[in-house]
Amino acid sequence: GKKLYLRRLKVVLNRAFYLYKLEKERYKLQKELSPECNSIIGTSDKMQIVLSEIKKVAKTDVPVLITGESGTGKELVARAIHEQSNRSEKAFVAINCGAIPENLLESELFGHEKGAFTGAHAVRKGRIELADRGTLFLDEIGELPMHLQVKLLRFLQEQSIVRIGGNEEIPVDVRIVSATNVDLEKAILKGNFREDLYFRISVVNIKLPPLRDRGEDLMLLANYFLHEYAMEYKKNIKGFSKSAIEAMKTHRWRGNVRELKNRIKRAVIMTEKRKITHNDLELDSLYTKYDGMTLKEAKEELERELIQKALHRNRGNISRAASDLGISRPTLY
């Protein structure tokens, strides 16, 4: 009994020591990555520009528009602006303009009085009011319906709102940070977004780079997420295999940081191995595919694949496939 107890104790202590080491490493990583914005990870030039822009605008009250592809971390930037602002002690209130049904969005934003409509049994403050003296984050602002764009513009001009079903002007002091993954200037030309509102919300525009343009940040983020999830799910994972690193570096990451995070989370939960492989991440690995080939063989294999894909895309039309690949028709043969 005593031997078994000691063996078990050893296992438990080893595990505790391992988790302690992980936690220490994570803390070190976090401090190194960004002393100012704990949540934003990035040492690439493009992210350093973003971090310095956050620092510059945070202490002011100017409206900020954050643009970038889906999954690039726009809400994190909005939160970092709030955390470094003079409003950091007050509320940060977020609303996704594209995720709330249009018929509920107005009352969500502006609130309603008791009896304003069927089911309005009590007075309800909207998100704008809840953010008083704090920061209001309007995510996917490009999805805001026209009549609410007018109402939002009026609020920005007057600095006061009227709840649905009410007539009292309620003064509200908020800092507006908006985000979009659509081109609002194009939306203006199409008549889907008001130009006057656009100028109001975009005094400063912070552009977030896609993950594929962030160079060394990719592995920095990957290691950070791996540490986070290994701790959360109590897994003893030592890192990424060579094939996983190659696969991550060649993947397009259309879902950006969110996609990276989700793939790593799933891999950590599902794997039984000590290292995450490209298969765990459900990524194709160039490394394994061309492993053991000479440069000439790998080049021929890649050319063959590209030609097959171009032919498939153009339903076997050789001239079109050749023009897609930027080569002449005879070269394709």
Image (tube, rainbow, N blue to C red):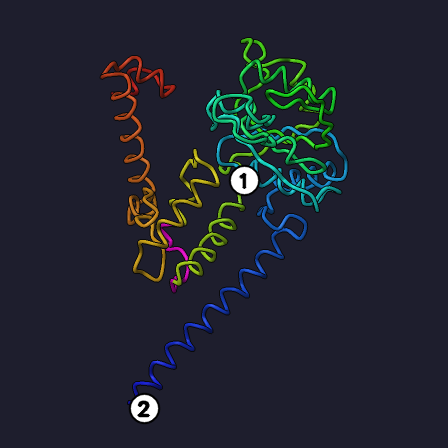
Which residue type does callout 1 highlight? Arg
Q: Is residue 99 above or below residue 326?
A: below
Q: Residue visible at 61% across and 29% down?
A: 178
* Towards the viewer: 298 or 201: 201
Identify the residue position indicated by label 2 in the image.
Answer: 2
Vertical position of residue 179 compared to residue 199: above or below:
below
Q: Position of residue 104 (x, y in %)?
A: 50, 24
Q: Which of label 1 and label 2 is nearer to you?
A: 2
| Quarter of the figure with residue 146 | top right
Asked where in the image residue 81 lies, by quadrant, the reply is: top right
**Disc 2 packing (10 Å; few <14; some 14–19; many ≥20):** few
Queried whether the magenta region covers residue 242, the answer comes back as yes
Report the side of 140 relative to 173 (left or right). Answer: left
Range drawn in magenta: 235-244
In the picture, residue 250 is in which quadrant?
A: top left
Q: Residue at x 60, y 17 (%)?
A: 149
N-terminal of the two: label 1 or label 2? 2
- Determine which residue is flagged by label 1: 214
Q: Residues within 10 Å of mark 1 (few under 14, many from 20)?
A: some
Residue contact at pointers 1 and 2, CB within 8 angstroms: no
The quadrant the C terminus occupies is top left
Q: Is residue 117 above or below residue 228?
A: above
The x and y percentages for residue 289 are 29, 44
Structural distance between the alpha carbons of marks 1 and 2: 55 Å
The amino acid pointed to by label 2 is Lys
